[in-house]
């Protein structure tokens, strides 16, 4: 039986990662609260997230988009997963890295967008605070990566359990002088948290298809639009500005496609850290597709699909596909992975207690009755 190596996050690394996640959540939550305070009605923030051009109460700009509450909630969930000892280390590390990747990709363009001086009509201190928030969150994302890389130690309970397996026994059991430890997996212990094959294939195929659809639309827009217009939608400009913390529309779509395709490749390989990566990408794609669908519904595009150009009908249809595929992938990726093999699920049995059970080599025959207190 081959031993299974599992990088284990130390307790200090888990605690530090959780603290960084809380800081990420607090920074974004502060801007969400700020938007609620300047809104004429509380629902205006919600409809602004869905793409409607609602005006705030003051002469200022909105700061958040539909992805910001999702990033806040995701950071809180990852913080809880990092400190829970029941969550395998590989899953906790994957959650921390997935949050770091999503934060870095979605905040990176804000560094040059908010520092280019395009938004002349806004309070300079407001844009400076938003830019500082983006830079701080980028630094925190890098800190999460450093925590995972520096806080890993090789080996864990699964390694120790596998090393004590005795040769000559069936693969489903290991022994220690008269005691048989039943192992639930017939092929030896797997790394805890690894997705099962069915869920991995489902999530991987759906995420890959949704990511390819989003990437295909970006290729379509790059060819359809003037080069300068597409560049503004990719790298940012005052003409495409929507909210202080919202990346340019084409940058956002390209980032989500990259996250989805990367998570699809990881989950198809059944990497132990792939489940949180797939859930992160699926949740972001779900919001992306749902916002496009709600906007099409509010603008009446659903009621006049027959009169729309072919590309517009296709755009609405693919938005529905992306939302549905992301939801199904999220459900598949959220299924529990393989259990920790260092905890025998079937308990400890005296050898010879089950019919046909193998006796460990060089062990004495089983007693006619178990000792008192066994």
Image (spheres, grey):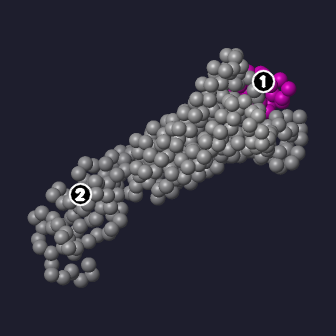
Q: Is residue 119 magenta?
A: yes
Callout 1 crowding tier (Cα within 10 Å): few <14, some 14–19, many ≥20: few
Q: Is residue 114 magenta?
A: yes
Q: Quadrant of the C terminus?
A: bottom left
Q: Which residue is mark 2?
A: 171
**In percent of the image, x 69 and y 20: which residue is there?**
225
| Residue segment shown in magenta | 111-127
In the image: residue 347, left or right of residue 370: right
Callout 2 crowding tier (Cα within 10 Å): few <14, some 14–19, many ≥20: some
**Spatial distance from mark 2 to mark 1, Cα to Cα?**
64 Å
Q: Quadrant of residue 281?
A: top right
**In percent of the image, x 15 and y 58: which residue is there?**
168
Q: Position of residue 270 (x, y in %)?
A: 41, 45
**In percent of the image, x 80 and y 31: which residue is there?**
125
Q: Which residue is mark 1?
A: 239
Q: Nearer the viewer, residue 219 or 73?
A: 219
Q: Quadrant of residue 175?
A: bottom left
Q: Report the number of discs.
A: 2
**In percent of the image, x 77 and y 21: which residue is there?**
117
Q: Position of residue 55 (x, y in %)?
A: 86, 38
């Amino acid at each position: 039986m081959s031993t299974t190596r599992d990088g284990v996050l130390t307790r200090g690394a888990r605690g530090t990662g959780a603290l960084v996640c809380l800081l990420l959540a607090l920074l974004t939550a502060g801007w969400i609260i700020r938007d609620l305070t300047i809104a004429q009605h509380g629902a205006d923030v919600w409809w602004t997230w869905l793409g409607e051009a609602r005006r705030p109460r003051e002469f200022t700009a909105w700061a958040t988009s539909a992805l910001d509450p999702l990033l806040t909630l995701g950071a809180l969930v990852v913080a809880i997963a990092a400190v829970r000892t029941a969550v395998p280390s590989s899953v906790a590390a994957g959650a921390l890295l997935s949050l770091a990747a999503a934060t870095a990709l979605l905040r990176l363009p804000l560094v040059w967008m908010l520092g280019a001086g395009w938004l002349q009509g806004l309070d300079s201190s407001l844009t400076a605070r938003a830019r500082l928030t983006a830079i701080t969150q980028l630094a925190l994302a890098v800190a999460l990566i450093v925590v995972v890389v520096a806080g890993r130690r090789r080996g864990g309970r699964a390694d120790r359990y596998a090393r004590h397996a005795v040769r000559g026994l069936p693969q489903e059991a290991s022994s220690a002088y008269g005691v048989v430890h039943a192992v639930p997996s017939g092929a030896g212990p797997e790394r805890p948290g690894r997705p099962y094959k069915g869920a991995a294939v489902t999530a991987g195929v759906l995420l890959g298809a949704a990511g390819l659809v989003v990437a295909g639309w970006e290729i379509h827009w790059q060819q359809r639009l003037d080069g300068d217009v597409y560049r503004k939608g990719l790298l940012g400009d005052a003409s495409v500005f929507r909210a202080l913390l919202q990346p340019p529309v084409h940058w956002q779509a390209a980032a989500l496609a990259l996250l989805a395709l990367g998570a699809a490749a990881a989950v198809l390989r059944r990497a132990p850290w792939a489940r949180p990566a797939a859930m992160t990408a699926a949740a972001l794609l779900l919001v992306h597709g749902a916002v496009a669908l709600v906007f099409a519904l509010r603008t009446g595009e659903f009621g006049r699909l027959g009169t729309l150009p072919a590309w517009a009908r296709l755009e609405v249809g693919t938005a529905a596909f992306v939302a549905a595929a992301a939801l199904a992938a999220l459900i598949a990726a959220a299924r529990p992975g393989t259990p920790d093999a260092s905890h025998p699920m079937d308990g400890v049995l005296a050898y010879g207690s089950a019919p046909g059970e193998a006796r460990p080599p060089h062990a004495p025959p089983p007693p006619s009755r178990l000792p008192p207190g066994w």
